[in-house]
Image: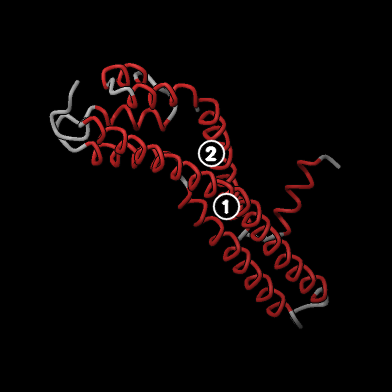
Amino acid sequence: MPIANIVIEFIHKGGPIMYPILVVSAFALCVLVERIFWWLRLASKRDSKQLDRVYEALEAGELTQAISQSNNATDPVVRMIHHGLHHHHSSMQGALEVAAGLELRGAGRFLGAMDTIVTLAPLLGLLGTVTGIMGSFTSIGSSELAVEKVTGGIGEALIATAAGLGIAIGTLVPMNYFHSRLAALKFDLEAAANNVLILAAQHGFDKIGAKH
């Protein structure tokens, strides 16, 4: 039997609650694929050598050189530093915080949606369990085919429960991984911001109207 037919039969046996479960699973898959590719692209953009060159320029007191070295950066840490060095109308610390917040917002995108999926999918499975069991009890004694209807209702309940739990488990593991990557990026941004503030304070670059 073709796999497509098996999936269709599985959905049919799971009852009407399988349709919203399918929608949730499709959304979860799209989110997972988008996040995986996003983090892969981010990993390819990290440039520790460029970051070191910016630090070296700041240590030497060359703010203009540091700005030039961080210009057109793809590394989010270097982008944050470049934004902080252009603090014409605010403090350097404030500019760094704003830039770090923008980077973290992009990195944390869809984590709330994934958390909702982890909670919603088992609840939909539980709803399928309830409706399946209700159908089993309703069919008891209604006809000579009551046994088949009872077993069908129980099967519907089990399939919906398994589908909901499967989606939740399949989303929970990568969600926790993305949370760990987000925490690591936050640490890198905070560490870089502190380093820049220390180096800038040594040369007076942290004040409004910094030396350019």
**Which residue is located at x 23 percent, y 27 percent?**
86
Query: What percent of the width, then of the height, locates residue 71?
Result: 34, 19
Is disc 1 placed on a helix, strand or loop?
A: helix
**Which residue is located at x 44 percent, y 25 percent?**
52
How far apart, in angstroms, are the residues tagged by discs 2 and 1? 12 Å
Left/right placement of residue 142 relative to residue 115 reads right
Residue 135, by quadrant, is bottom right
In front of the other: 181 or 129: 181
Query: What percent of the width, then of the height, locates residue 2?
Result: 83, 39
How crowded pointer 1 is (Cα within 10 Å; few <14, some 14-19, many 20+) is rated as some
User: Which quadrant, please, contains the C terminus?
Assistant: top left
Q: Is residue 196 above or below residue 60?
A: below
Q: Is residue 108 visible?
A: no
User: Which quadrant, please, contains the N terminus?
Assistant: top right
Is disc 2 placed on a helix, strand or loop?
A: helix
Contact (CB < 8 A) between labels 2 and 1? no
Q: Which residue is mark 2?
A: 35
Residue ranking furthest to the right = 1
Mark seen at residue 176: 1
Q: Is residue 195 visible?
A: yes
Q: Is residue 187 above or below residue 119?
A: above
**Which residue is located at x 68 percent, y 79 percent?**
138
Amino acid marked by disc 2: Arg
